[in-house]
Image (cartoon, rainbow, N blue to C red):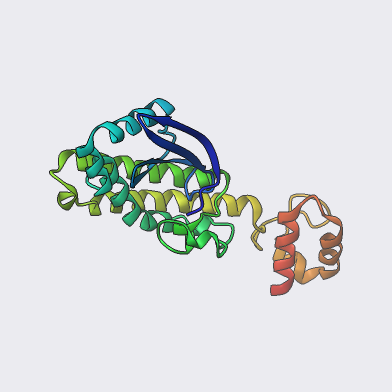
Amino acid sequence: MAIQEQIDTFEIEGVSVTVRLDAGAPTGAHTRAEVSGEGWTVGRTWRFGSYSRAHCRNFARKLATDAAYRRRCLDREATWAQVEDIYRRHRGDVLAVFEPLASGPPTAEEEETEGAPGGLGGRAKLEGRASGLANRFCQEFYEGIEGLLGQADGPEDVNVGPLKEDICRRAAAETQALEKALGERTGPLPVDHEIAFGEHEGKTLMQIAQEDPGYVEWALEELEGRPRLRKGLARALRRA
């Protein structure tokens, strides 16, 4: 696990609580509390901004004073634990949808984090809009599991398949749209793009590369402020 930063410690009803922030989680920053008493420790993760100190204190107090509830938590039978376990078993499938937006593979240390090994199931390399997109769909999946479990008699009655399939389908559509938008913004201009200025106005990049390779060589050196045009001309020159 890659818990990054200790943010709080306190004692209540004879148990100690340590709270840490996992700022490098695959989706957003999550908060994990470890509540320890004599001979036992319960760890709980609050995801998607749901943590509050008051909630954590109430949780720790109940663990300290309610032996039956503590046993349910230790046995992963409490509702929050069942939701977490189901989510962690399936979140790798949701995160895999966003792999085309990843800026690079995880490090060896990152691959050892909780959840699916490697890829985005370990530590996501997502930034900006891509990170927000992944966070939104993963939160929707997590909350959907909560809803399904609330309607079932237990985790064995929960079928997350339709929920996961729907979320992955919609996430894939938005991922493809974002990937296209990012590519259009940073990638090379297409070779059939027509120039709207200068001596080659009205010609495509491919026509320019075929008719005036010297101009292309000059442009690759001089047009520093137009990276998409330079990339497009370089591509056209290679194909000419």
Residue 136 at what x, y percent from top left? 42, 41
**Image quadrant of residue 224?**
bottom right
Q: Nearer the viewer, residue 29 or 200?
A: 29
| Residue 10 vertical position relative to residue 169 in the rendered view, above or below | above
Residue 202 visible? The answer is no
Q: Nearer the viewer, residue 17 or 27?
A: 17
| Residue 88 vertical position relative to residue 66 in the rendered view, above or below | below
| Residue 45 vertical position relative to residue 200 in the rendered view, above or below | above
Residue 39 at what x, y percent from top left? 33, 47
Lateral position of residue 49 relative to residue 148, left or right: right
Residue 42 at what x, y percent from top left? 34, 44
Lateral position of residue 109 relative to residue 91, left or right: right
Lateral position of residue 140 relative to residue 178, left or right: left
**Image quadrant of residue 140?**
top left
Residue at 82% of width from left, 70% of height from top? 213
Quadrant containing the C terminus is bottom right
Residue 234 at what x, y percent from top left? 74, 66
Count of numbered labels shown in the rendering: 0
Q: Nearer the viewer, residue 67 or 148?
A: 67
Q: Residue lying furthest left in this view?
A: 153
Residue at 40% of width from left, 60% of height from top? 116
Residue at 23% of width from left, 44% of height from top? 71
| Residue 101 vertical position relative to residue 138 in the rendered view, above or below | below
Residue 31 visible? The answer is yes
Q: Residue lying furthest top in this view?
A: 54
